[in-house]
Each structure stands twice: as structure tokens, then as C-alpha cells.
Image (tube, grey):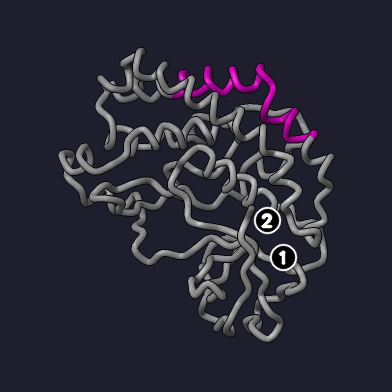
């Protein structure tokens, strides 16, 4: 069951992030701050729905995502111009942690031995396959949407910002693969983290497939429950969204296609490095 929070103080005009959606930093009743995406009108909250479903799926994949939930921004806590936020529609909020580090800048500062010692490397490949499976067009070397956090002396990847999953909301249409350039597998980070020998170890790579397929089935088993948790103000049609996502993500053909694309892109990146 997802958490529901509400704001406890006014959001100042400078408490937002200069990204495409201009998310707000909201202080909530659990005394944590949340990075909140919102609507500025009274229309269907497709963007927020995608963020919620992707975050919920990533939790099932046992990846390190920030705690998240639905945030009600009280009318008297709204920032001033230029934001025109509909406070009657709950936001999607991800807990803010100022100890997270930007992955690209941080990895450039680390030595090769440090990267091998501290990173949960397999998570990077899990995120790469996940993005192919959910058709996330917006995690690549020009925009990693990855943070790092320290857990028990080990840096772990934190995937963020999933507005662009399902080809940015086209899950009522036929699915198709993101390109190699739209995948983190094309980024220099791949070889900052892995040795080529590891990436060409067929037995190791194949061992990941069974685990990932189990995660996919886990996502399917809770899909309707997740959709039913969505706030009614988001104007999401439960059965329509369920049927669309089952067809878009969970056919045997698409799951196998995702695996084959993952292997192809991994090999292409290895070949390009030679």
C-alpha cells in the first residue's frame, strides 16, 4: 500500500528543480522532503501515473529507489508565480536525500579500483534491461537519471525520473524497442563499471535472465492492485490501463524481444570498444 503525505509548510519559489517538469521540493508530515511532480490543470494525470507504476515496478526489482508516495500540496502552501498547480490533484513524490551523488560526476572522480570495490554492478545491468522492457527513452549518456547512495560501505545505483517510460505514455499502441543510443548500455559508464571479460561471460549474463523474468512476473501479478491505488483525481481508467499495460509489457513475445535486444546492445557496445 502506497504512502499518502501532505505538505506542512509553504513551498518557497526557489524550492524547485530546473528540469523539464520543474518538480517542487515539498516538506511533508513525515518530516521528510519530497521531490514532487504535479499537474497544472484538471486533466488526466498520465505523467504521474507513469512515475508511480515505474517506481512500483523498480521496487519489485529490488533496486534502490527513493521512498515514494502521493503528496497533497495544500492550497496555502503552493509557491507563487510562475507555477499554476492544481492543489486538488495529489502529486507524485519521491523522498529527497541530499547525500545522493550524481552518478556521472562521481564516477569520473573514482579510480578503477574504487569502482570495482564499491558499486553494485549488477544493478546497472538490471536497470539497462528494465529500461528496454518498459521502453524508457530517457536514460542514456546525455541524461543518466541515476544517482548513487552509500549503503553499508557500498555505493548503489538509484534510478530516478521515469516520465518517459512506455515511450512517454504510448502504451495503448504496439511496443517497439528503444534504440541503442537511448540505452545506458551505450554509455561510457558501462566500461567504467565492468571489464570487457565480464560482459562477454555468457554464463554470467544468462544467469541474469531467470531473475529478471521472475521480477517481470511479479510486476504483472500486482499490476491491478497498483492501478487501484492511484488517486481517483488522476482520472485513470483502471481496466483500460491494465489491459493496455498487459498487452504492452507482458506478452511472452515482448519479454523475449527485450532480452534479445539487451544481448544485442551489450554486444554492440563491446564491439564498439574494440
Name the image quarter holding residue 204: top left
Rendering coords of residue 256 (x, y %):
59, 17
Q: Are marks 1 and 2 in contact (CB under 8 Å)?
A: yes
Residue at 35%, 13% in the rendered image: 203
Q: Secondary structure at mark 2?
A: helix
Q: Is residue 110 above or below residue 206?
A: below
Rendering coords of residue 32 (x, y %):
48, 71
Residue at which label 2 appears: 48
Name the image quarter holding residue 201: top left
Please state, as top left, top right, bottom left or bottom right, where the C terminus lies in the image.
top left
Name the image quarter holding residue 238: top right
Q: Is residue 75 above or below residue 266?
A: below
Q: Is residue 143 visible?
A: no
Q: Is residue 101 above or below residue 158?
A: below
**Foreground: 6 or 264?**
6
Q: Quote the CA–CA distance across marks 1 and 2.
A: 8 Å
Q: Is residue 241 visible?
A: yes
Q: Which segment is the magenta one?
A: 243-265
**Foreground: 185 or 1?**
1
* 195 relative position to 246: left or right: left
Q: Earlier in the sequence, mark 1 or mark 2?
A: 1
Residue at which label 1 appears: 39
Residue at 68%, 56% in the rendered image: 48
* 215 relative position to 87: left or right: left
* Main secondary structure found in the magenta portion: helix
Residue farthest to the top? 202
Residue at 75%, 67% in the rendered image: 89
Q: Residues within 10 Å of mark 2 (few under 14, many from 20)?
A: many
* 155 relative position to 252: left or right: left
Amino acid at each position: 500500500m502506497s504512502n499518502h503525505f501532505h505538505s506542512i509548510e509553504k513551498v518557497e519559489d526557489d524550492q524547485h528543480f530546473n528540469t523539464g517538469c520543474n518538480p517542487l521540493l515539498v516538506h511533508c508530515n513525515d518530516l521528510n522532503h519530497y521531490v514532487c511532480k504535479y499537474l497544472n490543470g484538471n486533466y488526466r494525470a498520465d505523467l504521474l501515473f507513469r512515475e508511480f507504476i515505474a517506481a512500483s515496478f523498480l521496487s519489485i526489482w529490488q533496486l534502490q529507489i527513493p521512498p515514494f508516495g502521493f503528496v497533497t500540496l495544500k492550497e496555502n502552501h503552493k509557491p507563487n508565480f510562475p507555477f499554476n498547480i492544481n492543489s486538488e490533484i495529489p502529486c507524485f513524490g519521491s523522498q529527497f536525500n541530499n547525500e545522493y551523488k550524481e552518478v556521472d560526476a562521481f564516477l569520473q572522480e573514482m579510480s578503477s579500483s574504487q569502482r570495482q570495490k564499491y558499486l553494485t554492478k549488477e544493478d546497472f545491468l538490471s536497470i539497462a534491461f528494465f529500461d528496454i522492457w518498459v521502453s524508457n527513452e530517457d536514460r542514456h549518456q546525455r541524461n543518466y537519471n541515476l544517482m548513487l547512495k552509500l549503503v553499508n560501505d557500498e555505493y548503489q545505483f538509484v534510478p530516478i525520473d521515469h516520465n518517459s517510460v512506455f515511450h512517454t505514455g504510448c502504451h495503448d499502441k504496439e511496443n517497439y524497442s528503444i534504440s541503442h543510443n537511448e540505452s545506458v548500455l551505450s554509455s561510457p559508464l558501462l566500461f567504467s563499471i565492468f571489464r570487457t571479460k565480464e560482459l562477454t561471460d555468457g554464463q554470467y549474463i544468462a544467469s541474469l535472465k531467470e531473475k529478471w523474468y521472475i521480477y517481470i512476473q511479479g510486476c504483472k501479478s500486482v499490476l491491478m492492485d497498483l492501478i487501484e491505488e492511484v488517486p481517483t483525481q488522476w482520472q485513470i481508467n483502471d481496466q483500460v490501463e491494465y489491459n493496455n499495460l498487459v498487452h504492452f509489457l507482458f506478452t511472452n513475445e515482448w519479454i523475449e524481444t527485450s532480452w534479445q535486444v539487451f544481448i544485442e546492445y551489450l554486444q554492440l557496445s563491446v564491439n564498439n570498444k574494440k
